[in-house]
Image: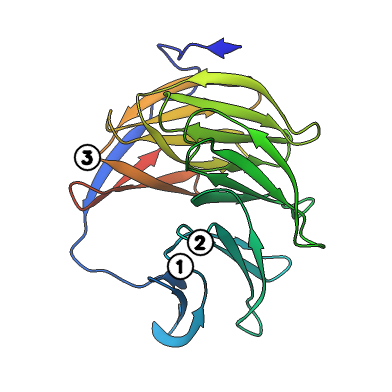
Amino acid sequence: MVSPAASGTDNAAASVTKISIRRTIRAAETVRHDHSERINVESRAFTATIPVGAVPQGVEVDPSTHTLYVANVEDGSVSVIDTETRTVSATVAVGNRPGGMGVDPSTHALYVATTGPGGVVSVIDAETLTVTNTVAAGRNPHDVAVDPSTRTAFVPNADDGTVSVLDLETLTVTDTLRVGTQPYGATVDPSTHTAYVTDMDDNSVSVIDTETRTVTDTVPVGSGPQGVAVDPTSHTAYVVNLADDTVSVIER
């Protein structure tokens, strides 16, 4: 079913601050044209280069298994990296043009959105490192955000203005939420059961209650929002705005 976006919110109104990027600090893992780079976050020193596939883009970490996953857009694969040895332990072929990914911390399964024609969500088993299932979402799925407690994943579909709700037990789409015109990135704050989905065309972030599967708020942010991350301790979301070189900070 398609659920319309709610006009109001049951939660406190969101407060947004926009930060201009005057200085860039490299993250712990950065992705370049055909390799992944490791940065020591304490010393901010470059410590390793790890060759991966062609045009790496998406990146996801499973901290409990010390595994880093890198989606390689041009060769349709995911590089599996042991973060302790800093080596590629496997390369898994997935669908056309893999992008955003999400890890289920309870099963360690990896969910990969493939953004090419006929895009699906590929499911990778963490033990066998093989694709065990594919799930059709909407048109041009771009990311996967997992809520482990509700056993659901939220998949923004860039070409039809929706978010597919994926049941992780049955691996079926059980709901479709209407959001903005070009949803792109997604993340989940698991303790508050809140998903954040960026919309590049509308310059906004849709806030979703992952228990009721409803859109509870739409928050204006900067221009061209793409990636979004949340601090689970402060429950603050950070949104990267491609078109105006800023980061929007959403506090609830």
Residue on which the image places disc 1: 54
Instruction: Tell which tag, 2 or 3, sits nearer the viewer.
Output: 2
Are there few (<14), some (14-19), or many (20+) residues within 10 Å of tag 1? some
Judged from the image, the secondary structure of the residue bearing numbered disc 2 is loop
Judged from the image, the secondary structure of the residue bearing numbered disc 1 is loop
For marks 1 and 3 on the same chain, the one whose residue lies earlier in the sequence: 1
Name the one closer to the observer, 164 or 229: 164
**Marks 1/3: CA distance?**
28 Å
Residue 97's label in the rendered image is: none
Q: What residue lies at 43% left-to-right and 22% top-to-bottom?
A: 179
Q: What residue lies at 59% left-to-right and 30% top-to-bottom?
A: 137
Circles 1 and 2, Cβ within 8 Å, touching? The answer is yes
Q: Is residue 84 visible?
A: yes
Q: Which amino acid type is marked by label 1?
A: Ala
Name the one closer to the observer, 88 or 191: 88
Q: Name above or below for residue 138 compared with residue 226.
A: above
Instruction: State the image coordinates of residue 96 (x, y, percent, origin top left).
Output: 53, 48
Q: Name above or below for residue 180 compared with residue 73.
A: above
For marks 2 and 3 on the same chain, the one whose residue lies earlier in the sequence: 2
Residue 132 falls left or right of residue 31:
right
Instruction: State the image coordinates of residue 120 (x, y, percent, origin top left).
Output: 59, 38
Residue on which the image places disc 3: 223
Instruction: State the image coordinates of residue 228 (x, y, percent, origin top left).
Output: 42, 46
**Marks 2/3: CA distance?**
30 Å
Name the one closer to the observer, 56 or 152: 56
Q: What residue lies at 22% left-to-right and 39% top-to-bottom?
A: 223
Q: What residue lies at 54% left-to-right and 57% top-to-bottom?
A: 76
Residue 17 falls left or right of residue 102:
left
Residue on which the image places disc 2: 75
